[in-house]
Amino acid sequence: MDASSDTFDKVDLKELKKNEAIMAALVLGLAKAPQRPGPRFTRAQIEATFPSTHLDDAMKGFLLWTEWTSGKRGRTQ
């Protein structure tokens, strides 16, 4: 949960840029990998992770929940 003291003026820009570069390298590495890093989850398996990962809350926050529930986003099987 965010605190009212969590404001952009307190961001350590050097650390932010470093972490952003690490994440970009990770995503690029995964995208270029010759094999998937693991098996693909079914829609039911993804939904089963909601209580522990709060992915449903993240999707709602990024305005993706309606697309998920309508079947426009995510695997339909």
Image: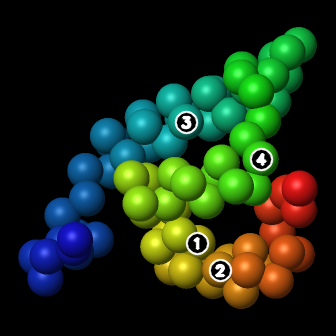
Mark 4 vs 3, N-terminal side: 3
- Give x and y (percent) for residue 2: 21, 73
Dot 2, crowdedness within 10 Å: few (<14), some or many (≥20)?
Answer: some
Disc 2 + disc 4, Cβ < 8 Å: no
Mark 2 vs 4, N-terminal side: 4
Between 24 and 30, the residue placed more toward the observer is 30
Q: Quadrant of the N terminus?
A: bottom left
Disc 1 + disc 2, Cβ < 8 Å: yes
Dot 4, crowdedness within 10 Å: few (<14), some or many (≥20)?
Answer: few
The answer for how far apart the CA atoms under marks 1 and 3 are is 20 Å
Question: Which residue bears the numbered disc 4?
Answer: 42
Question: Which residue bears the numbered disc 1?
Answer: 59
**Mark 4: amino acid:** Thr
The answer for how far apart the CA atoms under marks 3 and 2 are is 24 Å
Mark 3 vs 2, N-terminal side: 3
**Mark 3: amino acid:** Met
Taking the spot 38% from the left edge, 46% from the top edge, the residue there is 16
Question: Which residue bears the numbered disc 3?
Answer: 23
Disc 3 + disc 2, Cβ < 8 Å: no
Question: Which residue bears the numbered disc 2?
Answer: 65
